[in-house]
Amino acid sequence: MNILKKLLYPIAITATLTLSACSIFGVYTIDLPQGTPITQAQAQQIQPGMSKNQVLYLLGSPAMRDTLAPNRWDYIYDYAPGTYGKREGKEVITNASQHLIIYFDESETVVNVEGIESLPASSK
């Protein structure tokens, strides 16, 4: 029994260290979407004269509502693919490359929409 204990501990330690350093077992990472994914078709539904509530209904809450510019809503979308996203070949979207800006006037109606061209044509 004593010999078994002497062999078991080094084998267990060696196996633990070997498996923890093994690159076969990759670390699982999650997909990391940040913001609201919006397509060009959705953004084109926003027309001058629409109220803030109508925009909220169509696009959801904006990523940023600036307290110093309350008449501007920013919809920003970034995406970092995780384990499954990389396997499916999903692209990385960073640095706010999908950025939609909606301007409102004092009566809280849409005046201008910018950034539609930065959005994807359709959702994948």
Image (cartoon, grey):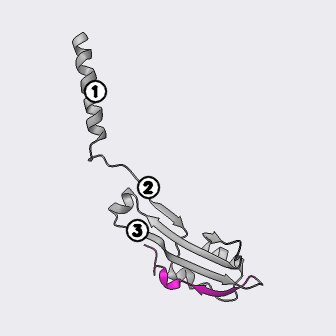
Residue placed at 55% from the left, 72% from the top?
76
Instruction: Report crowding for label 3: few under 14, some 14 to 19, many 20 or more residues within 10 A (C-alpha).
Output: some
Number of labelled discs? 3
- Dot 1 lies on which element? helix
Q: Which residues are magenta?
A: 108-124
- Dot 2 lies on which element? loop
Residue 79 position within the rendered picture, expressed as x and y whole percent measured from the top left: 46, 66
Q: Residue furthest right?
A: 107
Residue placed at 52% from the left, 64% from the top?
34
Q: CA distance from mark 3 to mark 2?
A: 13 Å
Amino acid on which the number 2 mark rests in the picture: Ile
- Dot 3 lies on which element? loop
Judged left or right of residue 20, residue 81 is right
Q: Earlier in the sequence, mark 1 or mark 3?
A: 1
Instruction: Report crowding for label 1: few under 14, some 14 to 19, many 20 or more residues within 10 A (C-alpha).
Output: few
- Write down the residue under mark 3: 92
- Write down the residue under mark 1: 12
Which quarter of the rendered picture does the N terminus lie within?
A: top left
Residue 90 position within the rendered picture, expressed as x and y whole percent measured from the top left: 38, 67
Camera sees residue 93: yes
Residue placed at 38% from the left, 50% from the top?
28
Indicate yes or no whether the magenta region holds residue 117.
yes
